[in-house]
Image (spheres, helix red, strand yellow):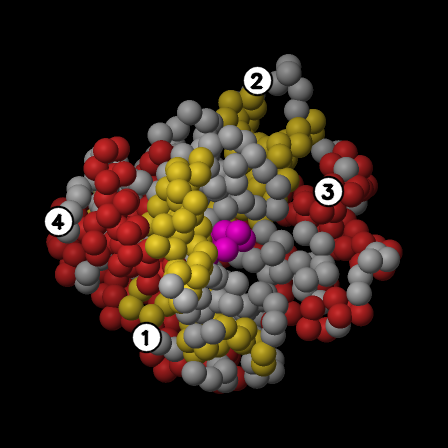
Amino acid sequence: MSITSFSPTCPGLFYGTSARDGILSRIRTPGGIITTQQFRVIADLTDKYGAHYAKITNRSNLQIRALKSLIDNDVLQILQEIGLASTNSKVDHLRNITCSPTAGIDTNQLIDTRYLVREVDNYIVNHPELSELSAKFSISFDGGEAVSITTRPSDVTFAAVIVDNKIYFRLILNGIYVGILVKPEECVSVVGALAQVYLAQTYLSIATSSQVSEKLLSEDNAENRKPRLKQILSQLGIEKFLEKVEHLLPFSLIKETPELNLLSYSNENKTGEERFGYQHIGIHPQRQQGLSYIGVVLTLGQLETRQIRGLVDIADTYGNSTLRLTPWQNLLVTDLPHKHIYDVKRKIQDLGLHWSATNIRSALVSCTGNTGCTSSATDTKGHALALAEYLDKRIALKQPVNIHFTGCQKTCAQHHKSDITLLGLTIEKDGEMVEGYRVYVGEGNSDDKFGKELHQWIPFEQIPQLIEKMLTVDC
């Protein structure tokens, strides 16, 4: 293991990524599950190196921003010993493996997928050649939970179904159901074959590309030239890709046919709360009798170190000494006896946090903004916080409203359409550059990336009053 160094690619633990606000480091938490011991170390690490806060990402990772220096070898070794850093630094940069945050406790689940997350993570750790894949290669498991993640963007998703009273997974590649069923015991082998075909096609794509410039071939741009899985599928075709995958397997892939009695948990025709995944916020009974979990609202996924330590104390005192990070940048405190719910709610509020799905912050999403990212036109995070503080004092929602601040077209924080999307841009006004937003609402047409455009440009100083008016009408 070597000391961390700078890298221009996706952030990890074994190298630092430079951002406007300092060095950025990311900690993978497979399945989003983190122990209180691990979270305490994160708080200490953040206080020592960073700006006294950590962020939960939309892959259930943890980010430490504004690091003042690179993380040294001794700290990395401690993180490895407690299971917070990969034992193989070469694959640490690959995206986190996700599952439903309620896996194992959801009353609707068909199968507990946590063990599959661990097995796939172990497979990746033991196959360092996969480090040559795009760092954005992502894998998800959905066990049929009410808190579903099948609508979350992922390269490979396994979605549990029941076929003739047996549990299988439907295979989804880049959001497309490809007509393949996978047995639970076959999932790791299928992931391995998918990854190996993807890797082979990656090498072929790079080697045969005649349009790659010398600049793009430089080491600093290595990640940029690695094709995403969707590009490989587009070039090769899904059918041909799956043929290559099946050739590497010791068993045949099972094809979906109309004759199969297939029952699945559907994400169609859901309410806004369910579509955007916020039904886990608040108090919910677990499948374990006498226990509940509380979904805690975090403002823009951010936790101060004092709040981390407070949540750790709650989980140790009343729960099972674990916390669960969600792809919606919130977290769950689980395994709480019903008699302690009132005390836990009070302690969460004492930390300055919330547990109600109708709190304006429960569905408020923002990218890093121009304080940390050169691609962003506006201070999205600062503006989102200002909007939340303004609305907190003026309105009470009856249901969650998903408001998404994005500083550019890339939409890093949220890849699906929102109830309200604010796209940042700057305009010269009276000789000065003024930050403002395009305003979009609803689904719009299929070609509308952000929904229906409501305003072409509104300066931020007018945004809070505009959103208040919109929500007063809707709520």
Of mark 3 and mark 1, the one earlier in the sequence is 1
Q: Which numbered circle lies on residue 233?
A: 3
Q: Is mark 2 on a helix, strand or loop?
A: loop
Is 445 in front, or is 396?
445
Q: Reply above or below: 121 against 242.
A: below
Q: Is mark 1 on a helix, strand or loop?
A: loop
Residue 422 in the image: state x and y as whole percent: 40, 48
- Give the magenta-colored segment's residue range: 407-413
Please tell me whether residue 408 belongs to the stretch shown in magenta: yes
Q: Mark 1 points at which residue?
A: 52
Q: Mark 2 points at which residue?
A: 261
Residue 309 seen in the figure: no
In 3D space, how far apart are the residues under numbered discs 4 and 1 (Cα atoms)?
29 Å
CB-based contact (under 8 Å), mark 4 and mark 3: no
> Which residue is at 39% across, 55% downward?
436
CB-based contact (under 8 Å), mark 3 and mark 1: no
Of mark 1 and mark 2, the one earlier in the sequence is 1
Q: Reply above or below: 83 against 175.
A: below
Q: What amino acid does circle 4 point to?
A: Tyr
Q: Nearer the viewer, mark 4 or mark 1?
A: 1
In 3D space, how far apart are the residues under numbered discs 1 and 2 (Cα atoms)?
53 Å
| Image quadrant where residue 390 sits | bottom left
In 3D space, how far apart are the residues under numbered discs 4 and 2 (Cα atoms)?
44 Å
Q: Nearer the viewer, mark 4 or mark 3?
A: 3
